[in-house]
Image (cartoon, rainbow, N blue to C red):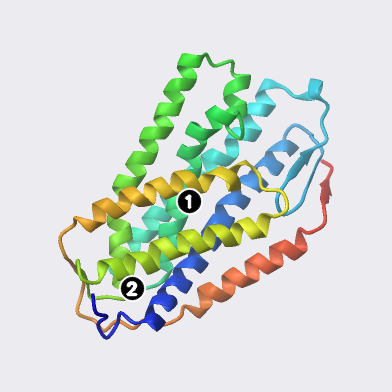
Amino acid sequence: MKPTNTETKKNFWIIATNSTASYVLAFLFVFYVNHFANILTSGSFGYEVSFDWNIIYYHVEPYEWTHDAVKLIFSAGPMLILLVGLISLIAFYSLVEEPARIKTFFMWLTLHALNYFFGGLLIGNIFKKGVGHVFNWMYFTDTTKMLVALVGFFGLLATAYFMSKPVAISANSYYNKLSEKNFPFFFTAQIIVPFVVGTILYTLYFLPDLRFQERYSWMSLGVLLIIIFGRVNYMETLYFDEEDRYISLSKAIVMTTLFVVIGLRLILSHEILVSW
């Protein structure tokens, strides 16, 4: 396919850079919502904790853990993230007719949040990490855990189904229509490259110790994106309004992402102790 006047290497990397910045910023937002939810709920039980950019250390003897503490501390984050994902989806649709590039951030934030929540129900059950701690402390039977895992599995499928349209609509930030001619160019720049490059970037950010979410969340998200690709690829041509579109670097999003990544990594580079 020969490039049109908008399908150039320069425009490809502009779209990819904008989306990659949104991808990384959205992932960090979800991660730290869970991170600080765990820290704050630990205070409800007077548990002393210390944390850095990646890990929370609970200065608690094994016998000091209670069922209520485990259930609240390790479920508050996922529930809050689910709420963030739903609010983000509402925010996306509130801007659905606007060419604003912030829609890309809300698109990725919704995908990351729902992937975190439903992926946690599925993968957390298997590895007994994150919300999986809650299921163990609630003494769920194998049958009950299987049902929870199925909720996570079908939740991921539902996410892929319902997020296909937002992914397609996000093209109106750059195009007046999304058709079979510009779809491969757009999807590669907006989704595939940010997924690959963004995952590498946040992996480097969390080194040297990758935790549960950073290790496995990309797998379920990758499956979601494959399903979304298949659905959007067979959609009819989407026509947006006739206003002129310009492909340009979203400096605000890129600079915000750089500021957040560098700022958090520096501020949280040393372990912070919290005594309630």
Q: Is 64 above or below relative to 4?
A: above
Residues marked 1 and 2 touching at CB (< 8 Å): no
Q: Is 244 above or below relative to 189?
A: below
Image side of residue 13 versus residue 96, left or right? right
**Can you tell which quarter of the image residue 53 is in?**
bottom right
Is label 2 in a helix, a strand or a loop?
helix
Distance between mark 1 and mark 2 Cα atoms: 21 Å
- Residue, x 30% and y 79% (percent of image)? 7
Image position, residue 17 (x, y; %): 48, 73
Which residue is labeled 2 in the image?
173
Q: Nearer the viewer, residue 123 or 100?
A: 123
In this view of the protein, can residue 98 be seen by the observer? no
At label 2, counting other C-alpha atoms closer than 10 Å, the crowd grade (few under 14, some 14-19, many 20 or more) is many
Q: Nearer the viewer, residue 194 or 3?
A: 3
> Which of the two discs, 1 and 2, labels the residue nearer the N terminus?
1
Which residue is labeled 1 in the image?
112
Image position, residue 76 (x, y; %): 59, 37
Q: Is 169 above or below relative to 253?
A: above
Circle 2: residue type: Ser
Circle 1: residue type: His
At label 1, counting other C-alpha atoms closer than 10 Å, the crowd grade (few under 14, some 14-19, many 20 or more) is many
